[in-house]
Image (tube, coloured by chain):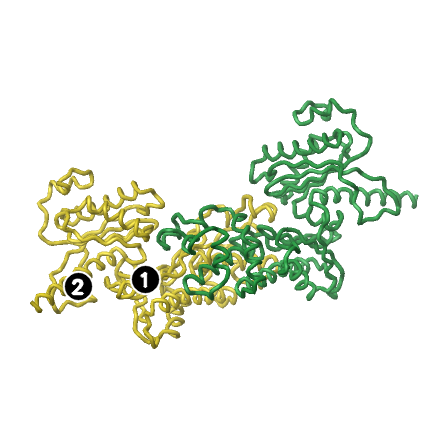
Chain colours: A green, B yellow
Amino acid sequence: MKRNRIRGPWDFEHELTGGRQKLILGLDGGTTDTVCICMPITPFTPNHNPLEAPPVYARAVAGCSNHNSVGETAARETLEQVMAEALLKSGSTRSSVRAVCLAVSGVNHPTDQQRILDWLRDIFPSDVEFFVENDAVAALASGTMGKLHGCVLIAGTGTIAYGYTEDGREARASGAGPILGDWGSGYGIAAKALTAVIRAYDGRGPQTMLTCSMLHELQLSSPDELIGFNSPYLNLNGIARWTYADPSWARIATLVPVVVSCAEAGDQVANDILLHAVQELASSVKAVVHRLGLCGKDGKDTFPLVMVGGILEANRRWDIGKEVISCIANDFPGTHPIRPKVEPAVGAALLAWNYLIEQAQLDQSDGDYV
Amino acid sequence: MKRNRIRGPWDFEHELTGGRQKLILGLDGGTTDTVCICMPITPFTPNHNPLEAPPVYARAVAGCSNHNSVGETAARETLEQVMAEALLKSGSTRSSVRAVCLAVSGVNHPTDQQRILDWLRDIFPSDVEFFVENDAVAALASGTMGKLHGCVLIAGTGTIAYGYTEDGREARASGAGPILGDWGSGYGIAAKALTAVIRAYDGRGPQTMLTCSMLHELQLSSPDELIGFNSPYLNLNGIARWTYADPSWARIATLVPVVVSCAEAGDQVANDILLHAVQELASSVKAVVHRLGLCGKDGKDTFPLVMVGGILEANRRWDIGKEVISCIANDFPGTHPIRPKVEPAVGAALLAWNYLIEQAQLDQSDGDYV
């Protein structure tokens, strides 16, 4: 029998009798790590408060599980390992699992979904429900308590807006990476600020406080060092220094706090960069809301807008997230902004949980009619 | 004696008696290939026409000689090989060489210059004059017949503006690569056009003819394929398709003709992208002219503006180069645009030639005073 096969990650199951409490596994596989949480299925009651999540029993963290980054074999090993660890920590075995929701980056195309579903069916007992989504869906669900309705705006190193209607339509905007104009992202903001430093230096743009602050932050003595020691012309294809020494966009995005500080100190150039980022982020959400009709025919329907990622966090005087919300609410007064209180892995579990509750409600009402 | 050492590339010299005609070697080492030309020193006459270049005796081509790209040993081998080949083709030996002007990308810093000078002194007889410059200088000299005065605007895959005053001051603008906002470059224009396609597709921007034309050119069926099959969110760090499949900026820049065609056909989005590029290219030149005071105190002095590179070539109805000139001439009526008739390697030789003529004139006037 499949469930009794001896597999490395599941050896611990021989030592356990297994709990009677049924569980949901929620996985969030981002680009840097993979989180798996284990949540009990609380008995359904008619007075269930849909805004209250069950407690998390156990949590396990592993590395990247994006099959495009690490390859399919390594991605599966990571996913299996992190699920086994979460179950072990909660003192349960696979026989307690009622549903698994796996939300990983790199999964969007139906063929990706199907491959992962087949693989999950091979690991778990046959009565387990599976949900395979991309990680933006988990971020949305983390704000809507598992309901796939509304829009999520993610803005960290990159940015994407992702929306879902109650009847299953979906749309996205941005998320096309740095070459294709994700200007509201952390990368986009910092790249614009570095450009402003170069422009001030070579006389194309106004002087800005960013020059001093960026050089200080990067411990460089001249904007020349941002480009390279050598012929500027060389840099078009040759070796250059700070900016081109490492192709990681995340590294450039770490400079966003410098831009925010300069804007807070009254620097006009930094301020304009942030205002532009706000417009860009808002336009991604507006495009998704408009295409899906989340705002209703009169444009005033209420819809959740889940805000996720470092760029949108309200921890500064110059609050990018707040400005984005106000810009969107101008067009769509029904915007209901939500900053999630739980992490995306919990969002993934809630997605499965929400589905099970709906099924239970349907079964119950079916029963009423019989 | 140094000049009699037996070295591989110079073995041919044993077969030659050497011509009596003195020569200049001009080298242009770009990012893809290295060109060396061999030019005779015509006897100096008081009626010498400074706009007429001596004929080219021989021309040799080799690969990249940027020491940052291929390493110092390989760069030197390439440079020595190409100089030997040009001399061999002209039927001369090193004893005929009066001057060498080496303009290669990757050479800007005084320490780079000194290293190359020392190395050249080791190869050539002790009475040879050496000039070591970066390749932007050769481009300028190719338009000014060797005189280091004025501004050169280079716009191909990348872009840079480079200026030189008669008293030896220099300045540059742009040339900072794609991350740092060289928006007037071929890369910049094409990246903006690809972004416009994505924005039209996800609803953030207006519809544009660029969508159809770009997809046709790239043989793709949907803008999604520009980004990737997979989760859009993934693309921030994962594998993506066309745009991110190859990090070469030159590959993206090849799409510029598509943008020009769309603009010529009346597409507003494409037109705006080109207008923006014109502003950016003009602003680089204006910054250099302003910083060096090439326009004089009243802003009306005449100065040469040498225009080089595929983006500035006047081969279309929508003529980017012409628009850039008119934009610069608005601010600086003394702008004298020049499209070089000779290649940069000849420019490099002319730079040495010009220096030798000035020396000869000085010697002659010294003689007059004695």
What residue do we see at 32% from left, 57% from top? B136
Q: CA distance from mark 1 to mark 2?
A: 20 Å
Residues tagged 1 and 2 counted as in contact (Cβ below 8 A): no
A62 up-or-down from B351: above or below: above
The residue labelled by disc 1 is B170
Residue B222 visible in the displayed image: no
Q: Secondary structure at mark 2?
A: helix
Q: Secondary structure at mark 1?
A: strand
Chain identifier of the residue bearing label 1 in the image: B
Question: Residue B207's spot in the image, x, y percent?
Answer: 57, 63
Question: Would residue B273 be found to the left or right of residue B102 on screen?
Answer: right
Question: Residue A124's spot in the image, x, y percent?
Answer: 72, 31
**As shown in the figure, which amino acid type bears the numbered disc 1?**
Glu
Question: Residue A139's spot in the image, x, y percent?
Answer: 68, 48
Instruction: Return the mark for residue B326.
Output: none
The residue labelled by disc 2 is B358
Question: Residue A126's spot in the image, x, y percent?
Answer: 75, 31
Question: Would residue A266 be found to the left or right of residue B120 on screen?
Answer: right
Nearer to me, B24 or B127 = B127
